Image: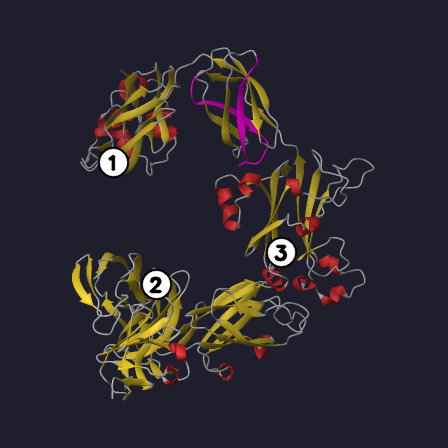
Amino acid sequence: MTDDLRKATHYANSSTAIIELSYSNDVTIPDQSNAEVEVGLDNGSVVTIGPGAATSFTEVSAGLIQVDTGTTFNNVQNVSVEAGFEDAAGNDVSDDDFDVTFAPSVVKVNDDSTFEAFSGENVALENASADSTFDIDGPGVSRTRGTGTNSLVYVLDTDDFENGDYNITNDADVTSVLEISDLGLDVEVDEDEFTTNDAVTATVTSDAINREITADLLDDDGDVVDTVETSIDSDGEVAVDFGTVEDTGTYTVEVTDDNSAVSVESGDFEVTEAPEGDISFEETFITEERGDNANITINFQGDVETANLTIGDQEEVGYEANVSVDSGGEDSVTVGFNTYVAGNTSTLNNADLVYIADGDSDAEITSVDESPDNLTNILETGTYPFEVSDTSFDEIANGNSDAVGDLELEERSVDSFNLWTTSADVYEDVEDVEDISNGVENDTVVETDSLTEGDVLIHELSATGLEGAIEANGGSLADLITDTSSANDSTGIDLRIRQTADSTAPNSERKQVDVQQMIADGNVDIISTEGSYYIAFEESNIVLDDSSRSISDEDAFDVRLRVKDERLLDPDEDELEDSDVDITDFYETATVSFEYVEATGEFDTPVEVQAAEDQTITGTTNAAPGQEFTVRVRSDSDVSPGFVQTSEDVTVQSDGSFEATGLDLSEASVNDTFTVTAQQATFDAEEDGTVVETVGEAAFLEVSDLEPAEATATAGDSVTVSATIENTGEQEATQNIALTLDGDELDTTEVTLAGGNSTTVEFTADTTGLDAGDYEHGIASDDDEATGTLTIEEDTSGDDSSGDDSSGDDSSGDDSSGDDSSGDDSSGDDSSGDDSSGDDSSGDDSSGDDSTDGSTPGFGALVALVALIAAALLATRRND
C-alpha cells in the first residue's frame, strides 16, 4: 500500500542533500537498516539508497521522513519506496514511482539572513517545524503559503518574478530576505541560415560562470533533434555545435541551465539544401619568380571538401607534384607551392614542398608526392600547368579535371640595395613593412648615405626568388645569412659591412662589423614582404670583429650582400667544369656604402625671445628625423628673478630642423639673458640667448570678397575683377598682389598696408583670344588667395559671317588701302609711317585684320604669360 505519499521534494539543507517524503498518514521506519529507496534520474539511471545505510534515513515525525541522498541530483525525476517503511498498523508501505520536485536554492525561513536565487528557479522555503505558514512580500508579490501536513518545506516557483528583494516571514514572526537576480542566460544562433553541409552552431552566454547546461536543437514541431551537454566557461559563454542537419526546415535552439532549470530559446533559423558540389581555382594564371612561393587558391562549393591538386606534368615539363587537400570546411583554401624545394624533397626533406598559406585555416595537406625529387637546381623557367579534381588524380591524368590553370615561372633577380635612416624613437614603433612605408610617406624614414650617431640604419634589399629558400631554412632572411668566413661557398647569403680602404688609417686593418654576432644578440631586425627585405640595426648596437676597436667619425663602410646558394644561382654546369671558373663567379652581388658621422646640432642664432607666452626657439641637427628630445631655457645666474622653461617632445624634421615651442617667458624681462640647451638628445647643443622687446604679430595679407566669384563673359568682353586685401597682423608689409588665371600670374600691383589696414584692388582684363570654356581666376597675395570661376562663351554676334571681311570692310580702311592687305606692311608702308599715321590706332586692324587672322586656337588654362598678353589681355589696376 502507498499510504498516501503526498509530495517528494529534493533540496540541499544545511548539512546535506535530502529528499523529503511527506505522507498524509503516519509512516515510520522501525528498522532503518532495512529501509530501501530508489531514486530515478532523467537519464534513465537509478540510485539505490539502503538497505544497510542506517544514517541515510531520518524519521522527523510520523509521516515525515528525510532520505539523505548525499549528492544533489539536479536531474532527479522520481522516487520509489522499496522496503522498510510501515504504517501505523505495522503494514509495509511501498510506493510506485512518485515525481520529485527539485529546488536548487533554499531559504531558511527561521533565519533572518539574506538568501540568493535566480529568477525562474524553484526555491525551497524550509522551516524548523512542520505545517508552518509564512508571508511572501516583494515586487508585485504578496501571498501566504505553507508547508502543509508532515512537511518542513514549501517550493516557491519564481517564474516571472522581478529582480529584487522579497521578505519571507514565518509564523514565529522571523523575516528572511530572498534576493532574486537574473541568471542572464541567452542563446544566439551563429547564422540565420545553414545548409545541410554546414555545422549548426550557437553561442550561449550567462551572467554566472561554470554552469552546466543542456542545449536542444528543436524542429518546427518542437521535437528534440539533437542534444549537446556542456558547461559555460569562466568567460561566461560557450559555443555549441550540433554538427550538420540532414533535414531542411525551420529550427530553434533551447538552452536549459541544469541546476536552476531556467531555459531560453533562440529565434528561428533555416536549414536549406546544400548546393551541388563544385571545385575551382580563384586564379587560373599565376606568375612567380623561380625560387619564390606560388599561392594556388582552391574554391570549394557545396558538399565538396577534398581536392586532388596536380602541379606540373611529368611528360610535358618533366616535373609533377600530386597534392591532396582537405578543406576542413573552408570555402577557400590557399596552397603554397615552394618552387625552391620543388624537385628536391629527397634532400630538402625538412622543408615543406606545399603548405596551407593561412596559418589559421582548418584546412590541411593530407598527402604529397612529387617526381622527380632529386633535382640539383630549382625548376626551370616556363609554364607549369596545374589541375584539380574532387574525385581522384586518375581523373586528372585522363583529362577529366574540374579546373585547370598555368603557373609561369620567370627568372629571379637581385634588383637594388638602398639605405634609409630614421631615429630610434621612430623605429621603436616599427613592426612591419607598412610601418616603414608610412615612415617614408611622412618623412620620418629618409634615404641616406650616412649613419649618424644614435640613429637606425635600414638596408633595403629588392630581390625576387628568395622566399622559397627563406621558408625552407627557418622563415627569416636571417636564417640564410652566413658568416663571411664560412668555408661553404655554395649555400645561403653573406652580408659583409667593412670599412672602405680610403677611410682606413695607414698601416691599419679595416674595421668590419660582426653581423653574425649582432644577429645572435637579437640586435638585427629583418622585416620583409615579398620581394623587399629590410635589414635594420641601431648604431649603438654595432659590434666589430675586433671588440677592442670602435667606429669613429667619418669612417666609411661598404655593405656587400651576396647570394651564394648554388640551387638559387643555377650555374651553367659546363662552365663550372672549367678549371678557371668556380661557384663564386656566379654569385649575385649588391653593394651600397655609408659614412658614420657624429651627431651634431645647433640653435639658430641669434637666440632671441620675447617676454611673453608661447615663444619658439629653432635649430638644426644632422640626426635622423623623428628623434624626440627636450629643450631647456635657464636664466643666467645674474638674472633676478630667475626662470627655467622646458619644451618637451621637440622633434627633428626631415630637413634636420627642429622647433622648441610653447616656452612661457612672460615672467622674464627685456635684456634678461639665458642659456638654451638640448637635453636627452643624441647630440649636444647649447647657445646663449636674450629676451628682447615684444614686437607685433607678423603681417598677413588676407584676400577676401573676390568679385565676381562666378562670372560669365563673351570672348572679347572686358572683365573687372576686384578683392579686399587686409593686413590681419600687426606689422606693416609690402607685397605684390597678383591677378591669376588658371594659376598663371597675369598682372600685379604693389600694396603697402599697416597692421589692421585694408584696401581694395581692381583689375580689368580684355578676354579677347580666350577659347570658350571655364577658367579659374583669382587674386593672390604672398600669404593668401581667393579664386572663382570665369566662364567664357563663344562670340556668336556674326561679325565674321556678316560678310564684313568679304564686303570690303578691311579694304575700305587704311590697311586695306594697301597698308596690310596689299602688302604695304611688307613693302615698308608701316615703316614709312602708315601705321603710325593712325591707321592701326584708328581701329582698322581690330575691325578686320585680327578677326580675319582668327583668335589664337587652343588658348587654354595653362598658357604662358607672354602668350596671354599677346592675346590682348590688358589690365588696369586701381588701389583704393
Mark 1 and mark 2: Cα distance apart in space: 66 Å
Give residue 234's quadrant in the image: bottom left
Q: Is residue 696 left or right of residue 444?
A: left
The kind of residue on which mark 1 rests is Thr
Q: Between tags 1 and 2, which lies in front?
A: 2
To which residue does mark 3 refer? 477
The kind of residue on which mark 3 rests is Leu
Tell me whether the residue at label 2 lies in contact with that at label 3, contact meaning CB atoms closer than 8 angstroms: no
Residue 864 showing in the rendered view: yes
Tell me whether the residue at label 3 lies in contact with that at label 1, contact meaning CB atoms closer than 8 angstroms: no
Mark 3 and mark 1: Cα distance apart in space: 61 Å
Give residue 275's quadrant in the image: bottom left
Mark 2 and mark 3: Cα distance apart in space: 46 Å
To which residue does mark 1 refer? 791
Crowding at dot 3, Cα within 10 Å, few <14 / some 14-19 / many 20+, comes out as many
To which residue does mark 2 refer? 205
Q: Is residue 643 left or right of residue 550?
A: left
Q: Residue furthest right?
A: 507
- Magenta span: 612-637
Q: Residue at x 59, y 70 (%)?
A: 353
Residue 863, position as x, y percentages in the image: 37, 34
Q: Secondary structure at mark 1?
A: strand
Q: Between tags 2 and 3, which lies in front?
A: 2
Q: Secondary structure at mark 3?
A: helix
Q: Residue at x 28, y 66 (%)?
A: 128
Tell me whether the residue at label 1 lies in contact with that at label 2, contact meaning CB atoms closer than 8 angstroms: no
